[in-house]
Amino acid sequence: MQRREFIALIGTMGAVWPRRLIAQPADQARKKLPRIGFLASVPHERIDAFDRGLREQGYVEGQNIIIERRFWNNDPKQLARFAAELVALDVAVIVAPTTPEALAAKAVTGTIPIVTATADAVGVGLAASHAQPGGNVTGLSAVASSSRNFGLLVELLPGASRFAVLLDPDNGYHAQTMAVLQKAAAEQHLRIQPAVKRSVEDIGRAFQTMASNDVQGLLVLADPIGAANRRKIIELAAQNRIPAVYYWREDAIEGGLLAYGPDLVDLNRRSATYVAKLLRGSKAADLPIEQAERFRLVINLKTASALGLSIPTALLATADEVIE
């Protein structure tokens, strides 16, 4: 090979090699970034809150972290598939904001840490206790004060005496709550009965029973069945003209009369703190489940009008949000 040809060949290879050397480290670096799995039913404002919380902890998607997002659109089969898919991707942490997602993730992994903001992780068997979760699930507790919610129902219906609680008696949290509410109702000389829903098929029958017993007000306890069938419960309450109090803002947004419960946006922002701790070496079993700090009262005046109810002025004044 002539000297001139050799120099030309080296020059050509030099133009190619740097691009490869630059591209390969970039691809390798991306592969080494920690991956977070995020399970949610649909995109919503709580996801933005979680991302904001991550940035507060120093994590920016695409820069020093990768987020694998999966939306299951209220399809249980798709939820199970996505949970298994995240495990197969070997993510470092799975963020499961609500009970259905946490249960689905827990069903397919006992080792990958799961961060949730569920109504009651202990009550549904996701954790041994709030102080010492003991497994691979930690996060925040979205439990609201059921006594407060029942008090709101009584305040809305000052002349009523017959109430019901839509619950799953096999849920430990529901069973404990019902015992507390029955004691409170007895002290006020009110009648309160359980309306059982162990499955979606029970919901219709529960409302038939309430209608036949002339129930005047209903408290809906939060759980996976209720979350997955929110619209059905709200529609049946409207059809049977039973004023109902719920826990989540979404319940009131979709037509429920009143909702009082933890601020889910704030819970999702705070859940990013748990993700950061886990990525830095903490164990889910040792991270205590923290309580909600902010609560929201949401009143739907459209539903109140349809039911012929007048919301007390004092109650309206304390509402965080009023739907007109």
Image (cartoon, helix red, strand yellow):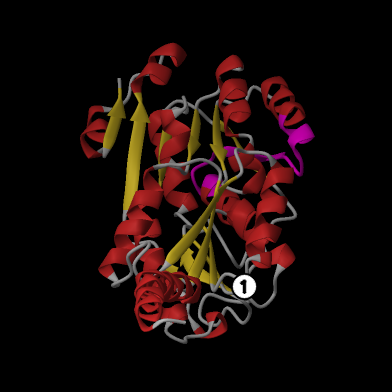
In the image, is residue 79 above or below residue 60? above
Q: Is residue 283 magenta?
A: no
When asked about the image quadrant of residue 173, the answer is bottom right
Q: Which residue is mark 1?
A: 127
Identify the magenta region: 185-203
Name the side, left or right, on which 164 lies relative to 145: right
When asked about the image quadrant of residue 250, the answer is top left
Classify the position of the C terminus by image quarter.
top left
Name the side, left or right, on which 241 lies relative to 148: right
When asked about the image quadrant of residue 161, the answer is top right
Residue toward you, 44 or 171 = 44
* Residue 166 showing in the rendered view: no
User: Which residue extends farthest front?
Assistant: 2
Residue 322's spot in the image, x, y percent? 29, 29
Residue shown at 73% from the left, 65% from the top: 108
Q: Is residue 201 magenta?
A: yes
